[in-house]
């Protein structure tokens, strides 16, 4: 007997990315199964910068299913967790390890309990699709542990029942969630359009925007939109189907101009639907609007889009730059308008891939202070600077899908105690 475990324990650890939609999912036709009213398309973000890591463990010593998120125990009693666990238990396979004298038959999984520990490598409070990475990782790691012999697409339909957008985090690169039309949701799954190597020039810069107010959750926000917005119906039926085809085409051809126009238009339409909801929902704030202006004025000045922007259910901006050169020009603009507040050092203000900061020649606070307003500012954007309005930036890129982590030191649960390390 070791620690509090008096029987064997089996574990699996995985890491799964978050994703950002360029054609948005907003509105369900089935609240329990989480079936959407339109297709959506996203890109997966490099897991080195934004991902969830989850260890799942099973042992006859465990008395109940338990979960810890970022070190704090949370309840698994919610319907979404229960649905995912039930679907996975129904698909579990046999497991045998003769050397350790372990045997689990398919039907045993229904009686065994799990300990689950998960953590995000970014602040949960930042509002960066943590539930997408979290549910994708939970489903992926449990499927490995339980020998679930299903295609990733089928696993995506299980992750979807945890959080809709989570189904798109089961793949890297660009991903489409097809809404499907079956009542049981069996065809509402994610498919990979292209992997992360297809368009590897793209650079992503996320602005985590300071916000004091607690936002409406996506779940309740979209429910209110379905109930009250007629623009939502129009969008789902008359706009999105065509946009999906155009977006697929521009991704396939790496046509940045078309990609950027569609991405910005769809983000703006999603926020228009939020305004069309009664009572209206405001996810973007003054800083978000300022960022849109900066990008729009610059794109207009250059004649062709340099950068696309998109906003989810919160004020944070996700910007996609055509290539590294435009990413450095973008970062210069962003740091001109949103310099760090006096108590910040640059190292904690620009996170992720810091090489872009070097390429932009912005390695010191002095170099930021002496930035000149961009050329297009002279025409008509104000060149007022807003220190403190952005909490920090993350520089990243499109990335790969979930992976299993095999090293013992990557596990979040102790093999001695069966509890989080
Ligand atoms: C604006 O997937 O968080 O980010 O299915 O209720 O869990 P639930 O909602 P969620 O909604 C995401 C909404 C969005 C757009 C998108 O990711 O497509």
Image (tube, grey):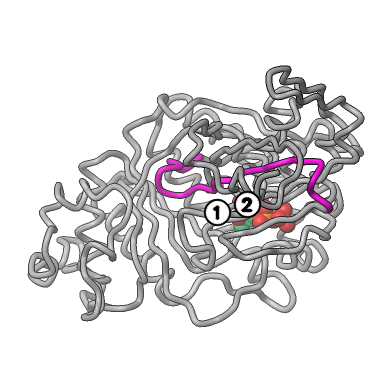
Image: 96 above or below 404: above
Disc on res. 117:
2
- Count all numbered tags in the image, as a single digit: 2
Residue 282 pos. (x, y %): 59, 74
Give the class, few, some or many, for how many residues have Cα within 10 Å of label 1's Cα (few <14, many ≥20). few
Image: 240 above or below 367: above
Residue interval drawn in magenta: 44-63
Question: Residue placed at 24% from the left, 56% from the top?
Answer: 331
Q: Is mark 2 within 8 Å of ligand 1?
A: no
- How much space separates mark 1 and mark 2, taking CA atoms? 9 Å
Residue 397 pos. (x, y %): 38, 41
- Earlier-in-chain disc, 1 versus 2: 2
Q: Secondary structure at mark 1?
A: loop
Marks 1 and 2 close (CB-CB < 8 Å): yes
Give the left or right position of residue 57, taking residue 356 as reference: right
Identify the residue at the far top of this view.
98
Q: Residue 82 or 232: which is nearer the viewer?
A: 82
Give the class, few, some or many, for how many residues have Cα within 10 Å of label 2's Cα (few <14, many ≥20). many
Question: Residue placed at 76% from the left, 63% from the top?
Answer: 75
Residue 203 pos. (x, y %): 33, 43
Question: Residue placed at 75% from the left, 55% from the top?
Answer: 66
Question: Residue placed at 58% from the left, 62% from the top?
Answer: 71
> Which one is closest to the eye, mark 1 or mark 2?
1
Visible in this render: residue 26?
Answer: no
Give the left or right position of residue 21, taking residue 28 as reference: left
- Decide whether residue 53 is among the magenta residues: yes
């Amino acid at each position: 007997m070791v620690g509090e475990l008096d029987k064997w324990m089996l574990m699996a650890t995985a890491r799964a990315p978050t994703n950002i939609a360029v054609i948005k999912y907003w509105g369900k036709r089935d609240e329990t199964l989480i079936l959407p009213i339109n297709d959506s398309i996203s890109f997966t973000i490099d897991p080195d910068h934004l991902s969830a890591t989850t260890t799942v463990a099973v042992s006859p010593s465990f008395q109940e299913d338990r979960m810890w998120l970022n070190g704090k125990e949370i309840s698994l009693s919610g319907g979404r967790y229960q649905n995912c666990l039930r679907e996975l238990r129904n698909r579990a396979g046999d497991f045998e390890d003769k050397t350790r004298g372990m045997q689990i038959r398919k039907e045993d999984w229904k009686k065994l309990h799990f300990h689950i520990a998960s953590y995000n490598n970014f602040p949960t409070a930042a509002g960066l699709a943590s539930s997408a990475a979290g549910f994708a990782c939970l489903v992926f790691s449990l499927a490995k542990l339980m020998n679930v012999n299903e295609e990733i697409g089928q696993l995506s339909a299980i992750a979807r029942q945890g959080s809709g957008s989570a189904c798109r985090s089961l793949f890297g690169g660009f991903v489409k969630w097809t809404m499907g039309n079956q009542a049981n949701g069996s065809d509402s799954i994610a498919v990979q359009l292209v992997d992360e190597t297809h368009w590897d020039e793209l650079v992503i810069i996320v602005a985590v925007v300071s916000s004091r107010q607690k936002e409406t959750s996506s779940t309740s926000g979209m429910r209110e939109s379905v109930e009250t917005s007629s623009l939502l119906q129009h969008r789902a039926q008359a706009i999105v189907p065509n946009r999906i085809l155009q977006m697929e085409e521009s991704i396939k051809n790496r046509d940045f101009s078309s990609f950027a126009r569609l991405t910005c238009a769809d983000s703006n339409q999603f926020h228009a639907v939020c305004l069309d909801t009664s009572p209206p929902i405001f996810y973007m704030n003054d800083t978000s609007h300022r960022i849109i202006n900066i990008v729009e004025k610059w794109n207009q000045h250059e004649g062709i889009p340099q950068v696309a922007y998109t906003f989810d259910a919160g004020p944070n901006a996700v910007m996609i730059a055509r290539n590294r050169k435009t990413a450095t020009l973008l970062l210069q603009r962003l740091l001109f308008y949103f310099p760090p507040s006096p108590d910040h050092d640059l190292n904690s203000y620009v996170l992720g891939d810091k090489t872009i900061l070097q390429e932009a020649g912005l390695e010191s606070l002095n170099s930021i202070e002496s930035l000149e307003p961009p050329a297009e500012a002279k025409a008509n954007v104000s060149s007022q600077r807003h220190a403190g309005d952005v909490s920090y930036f993350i520089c990243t890129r499109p990335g790969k899908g979930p992976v299993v982590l095999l090293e013992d030191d990557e596990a979040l649960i102790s093999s001695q105690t069966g509890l989080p390390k």
